[in-house]
């Protein structure tokens, strides 16, 4: 049986939603940005991020625009991992460096400034393209090509055998999804244990 990725499920739902909701517009509020720490990622953190990306790519080959800045781990909470004690949420975010790309190793990844790339996302919003008469599938494909993928700060449990990390993909006002993954270290490799706290816009 062929497995279905989050990305495929999201794309299918997005096509249906945009067809019905092309006249809608999501609001955006001002958020206070956390401080940026210049601390580097550990090899273990990069291995977790690599596993998260591999799970999202699911052996498909396409380009992704990865935010140079992580997101605060405060978003990776709620009921996720409530039966396990994880590190406290980070109050700062960090920056991926070009030399980190090789360790992340999944697909073709382009590091982008999240603020500057936001204009590219908005300029290629599939909802706007559909309102201008574009084919729905072409509009979604264009939105995906210009979307922004963001990884959250990782929180480990005391034994460093489990980690919790959030992710998000933003491709327009009605185009986005994300969630939180619990990752588990098995035989020296990080794998997804479960997804939780998922959302779709």
Image: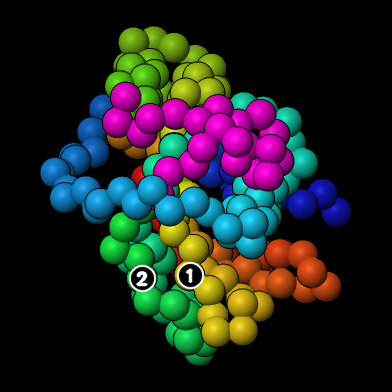
Compared with 10, 172 (above or below) is above
Are there few (<14), some (14-19), or many (20+) residues within 10 Å of tag 1?
A: many
Residue linked to disc 1: 155
Q: Residue at x 43, y 53 (%)?
A: 39
- Does 52 lie within the magenta span? no
Outermost residue, top side: 133
Provide the residue span drawn in magenta. Answer: 94-116
Q: Position of residue 97 (x, y in %)?
A: 51, 37
Q: The N terminus is located in which quarter?
A: bottom right
Compared with 169, 197 (above or below) is below
Residue 14 shows in this picture: no
Q: Residue at x 35, y 65 (%)?
A: 90
User: Element at badge 2?
Assistant: loop
Query: In the shown orientation, is residue 49 left or right of residue 54?
Result: left
Choose the circle earlier in sequence order: 1 or 2: 2
Residue 82 shows in this picture: yes
Q: Position of residue 181 (x, y in %)?
A: 55, 64
Residue linked to disc 2: 89
Nearest to the observer: residue 21 or residue 112: 112
Asked which quadrant contains residue 104, the reply is top right
User: Element at badge 1?
Assistant: strand
Asked which quadrant contains residue 60, the reply is top right
Q: Position of residue 175 (x, y in %)?
A: 40, 36
Q: The C terminus is located in which quarter?
A: top left
Query: In the shown orientation, is residue 125 left or right of residue 98?
Result: left
- Does 104 lie within the magenta span? yes
Mark 1 vs 2: CB contact within 8 A: yes
Alpha carbons under labels 1 and 2: distance apart: 7 Å
């Amino acid at each position: 049986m062929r497995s279905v990725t989050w990305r495929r499920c999201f794309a299918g739902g997005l096509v249906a939603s945009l067809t019905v909701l092309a006249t809608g517009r999501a609001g955006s509020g001002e958020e206070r940005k956390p401080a940026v720490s210049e601390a580097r990622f550990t090899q273990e953190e990069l291995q977790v991020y690599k596993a998260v990306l591999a799970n999202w790519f699911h052996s498909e080959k396409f380009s992704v625009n990865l935010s140079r800045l992580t997101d605060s781990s405060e978003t990776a909470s709620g009921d996720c991992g409530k039966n396990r004690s994880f590190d406290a949420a980070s109050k700062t975010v960090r920056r991926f460096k070009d030399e980190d790309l090789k360790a992340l190793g999944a697909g073709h990844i382009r590091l982008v400034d999240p603020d500057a790339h936001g204009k590219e996302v908005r300029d290629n919003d599939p909802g706007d393209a559909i309102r201008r008469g574009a084919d729905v599938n072409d509009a979604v494909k264009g939105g995906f090509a210009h979307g922004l993928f963001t990884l959250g700060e990782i929180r480990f449990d005391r034994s460093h055998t489990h980690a919790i990390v959030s992710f998000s993909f933003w491709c327009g006002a009605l185009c986005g999804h994300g969630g939180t993954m619990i990752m588990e270290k098995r035989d020296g490799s990080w794998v997804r244990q479960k997804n939780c706290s998922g959302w779709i816009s």
